[in-house]
Image (spheres, helix red, strand yellow):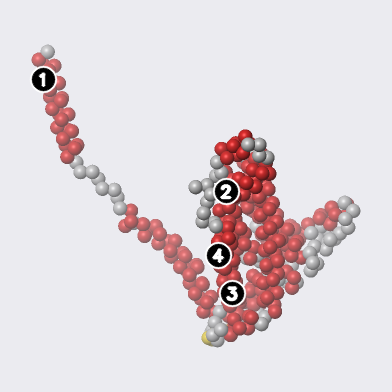
């Protein structure tokens, strides 16, 4: 009994000693990651400086020079910008691009909203989402070649279908149908991607709101108008800004469908910049047009974000 008592006392003393030792240790200070953070940020900053800041600064400089790629640039001040104000082709290309952007954004956003709402309320099939994304994965050159054949006046499937329905034939490449046809092609290619972005935004809306609305007797259309649309506003603003910038950058579809020689009704602003820079070798003037386009896009994006109050969410 005495041996057991002595063993217990020694264990208790050892435990107290260990406790004192453990208690005497100083808590470890959390590691300061700020010292190594610049190492991880540096590649991004270097890439941004090399691929964005430097070309922008060079573009601003070239826009104030007379530069043909074959000779050294010579400073001309604001001559390129004053010439641009009286350039009918520039204003026509800007008007054509705005026309295309309007058709493309409206058709793409309306269709994408409908698809996203149907997926959100009816099915969440992963196969369906993957199928919607397929046109977005096809390269734009392939999309242009495919639709150039489908919309062909003589051999195209679209006109055969219209003729079979007794609606005659449509010359999709005529001046009146040219830009709507190009918008149709890009709407087909990008609507699925836009729908998935909106669908992801709808998944963030609490399901309890829909259940309460059903209890109150609200229908699907009323729930979409009173719940989905208001709470989707930040995502919708993001989608509209991305679609706006992407639509202004249209080039490859027009270049492929019209084989590098678009008619005036389809000469979008990016193609006009390309022609000035690499067909006529007016690199300085092309840079001035590009700078004006950057300013226009910046203003439109700012106005769009302010009108849609993109930084505020009603979910909070």
Gap in angstroms between the C-alphas marked 4 and 1: 81 Å
The crowding category of the residue bearing disc 3, from other C-alpha atoms within 10 Å (few below 14, some 14 to 19, many at least 20), is some
Q: Residue 82: which numbered mark, if any?
A: none
SS class, disc 2? helix
Is residue 91 at all visible to an observer of this figure?
yes
SS class, disc 3? helix
Instruction: Name the residue carrying label 1.
Output: 6
Disc 3 + disc 2, Cβ < 8 Å? no
Disc 4 + disc 1, Cβ < 8 Å? no
Instruction: Name the residue carrying label 3.
Output: 292
**Residue at screen point 73% across, 69% down:** 266
Disc 2 + disc 1, Cβ < 8 Å? no
Report the residue that reaches farthest toward the front. 216
**Residue at screen point 12% across, 13% down:** 1
Instruction: Name the residue carrying label 2.
Output: 231
Q: Against 44, is 232 above or below?
A: above
Instruction: Name the residue carrying label 4.
Output: 302
Disc 4 + disc 3, Cβ < 8 Å? no
- Nearer to us of marks 4 and 3 is 4
């Amino acid at each position: 009994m005495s041996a057991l008592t002595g063993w217990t006392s020694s264990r208790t003393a050892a435990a107290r000693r260990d406790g004192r030792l453990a208690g005497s240790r100083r808590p470890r200070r959390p590691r300061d990651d700020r010292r190594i953070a610049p190492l991880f940020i540096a590649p991004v900053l270097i890439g941004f400086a090399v691929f964005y800041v430097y070309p922008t600064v060079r573009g601003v400089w070239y826009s104030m020079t007379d530069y043909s790629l074959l000779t050294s640039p010579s400073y001309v001040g604001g001559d390129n910008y004053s010439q641009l104000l009286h350039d009918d082709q520039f204003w026509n290309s800007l008007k054509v691009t705005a026309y295309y952007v309007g058709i493309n954004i409206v058709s793409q956003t309306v269709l994408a909203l409908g698809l996203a709402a149907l997926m959100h309320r009816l099915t969440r099939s992963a196969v369906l989402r993957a199928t919607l994304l397929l046109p977005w994965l096809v390269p734009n050159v392939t999309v242009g070649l495919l639709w150039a054949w489908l919309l062909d006046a003589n051999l195209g499937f679209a006109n055969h279908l219209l003729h079979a329905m007794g609606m005659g034939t449509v010359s999709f490449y005529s001046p009146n149908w040219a830009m709507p046809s190009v918008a149709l092609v890009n709407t087909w290619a990008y609507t699925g991607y836009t729908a998935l972005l909106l669908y992801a935004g709808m998944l963030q809306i609490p399901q309890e709101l829909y259940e309460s609305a059903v209890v109150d007797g609200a229908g699907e259309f009323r729930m979409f108008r009173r719940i989905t649309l208001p709470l989707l506003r930040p995502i919708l603003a993001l989608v509209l800004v991305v679609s706006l910038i992407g639509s202004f950058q249209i080039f490859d579809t027009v270049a492929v469908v019209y084989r590098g020689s678009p008619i005036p009704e389809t000469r979008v602003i990016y193609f006009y910049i390309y022609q000035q820079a690499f067909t006529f070798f007016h690199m300085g003037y092309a840079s001035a047009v590009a700078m004006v386009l950057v300013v226009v896009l910046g203003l439109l994006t700012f106005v769009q974000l302010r009108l849609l109050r993109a930084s505020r969410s009603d979910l909070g």
